[in-house]
Amino acid sequence: MNPVRANMVKHPGEYRWSSYVANATGKKTEWLTPHGEYLALGAEEAKRLEAYRGLFATDLDLGPELVREIRTSTHGGYAVGDTRFRDEIERTLKRCATPRTIGRPRQ
C-alpha cells in the first residue's frame, strides 16, 4: 500500500465523526454547532452546502515530502509551515513549534 495514498475512508462522508454530511447535505446533527468559517461560505443554506461540497471536489496533490512533514509535525506536536509562520506560533503560544536537534548544544 502506498503510504501517501493511505486513507482512513475513501470519502469524508464515510467517517462516523466527520461533519461532512451535515455541512455538505444539510442533515441535522445534535452534536454539531456550525463554525463561523462554514457560515461564511454563504448567506443562504443552499449556497453554503454547495460551496462546502466544492471544497472536496478535487483530491489534494500531496507529494511524499509534504506527507512526511505533516506526519512528523503531527507526531511531534509541531506547526507545519515556513519559518516565519513557526516563529509567529512560538511567540503567540510561548511554546516550541519547530523540531529541535537532539542532544546538547555544540560549544
Image (cartoon, rainbow, N blue to C red):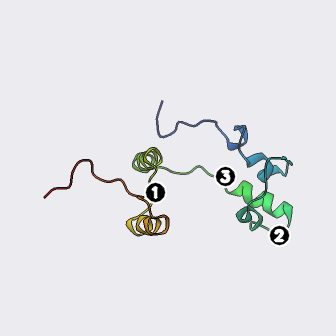
Q: Which residue is mark 2?
A: 43
Q: Position of residue 40 (x, y in %)?
A: 75, 68
| Cα gap from disc 1 to disc 2, whole angstroms | 32 Å
Viewer-closest of 81 and 59? 81
| Upstream in sequence: badge 2 or badge 3 | 2
Question: Does residue 65 appear to the left or right of 50 in the view shown?
Answer: left
Q: Kindly report which numbered mark, 1 or 3, lies closer to the viewer in this rendering.
A: 1
Dot 2 amino acid type: Ala
Mark 2 touching mark 3, by CB under 8 A? no
> Up-down: is 85 above or below 69?
below
Viewer-closest of 70 and 13? 70
- Residue 10, quarter of the rendered image: top right
Q: Which residue is mark 1?
A: 80
Q: Position of residue 8 (x, y in %)?
A: 60, 36
Residue situated furthest top in the rendering: 1
Q: Which residue is mark 3?
A: 56
Residue situated furthest left in the rendering: 107
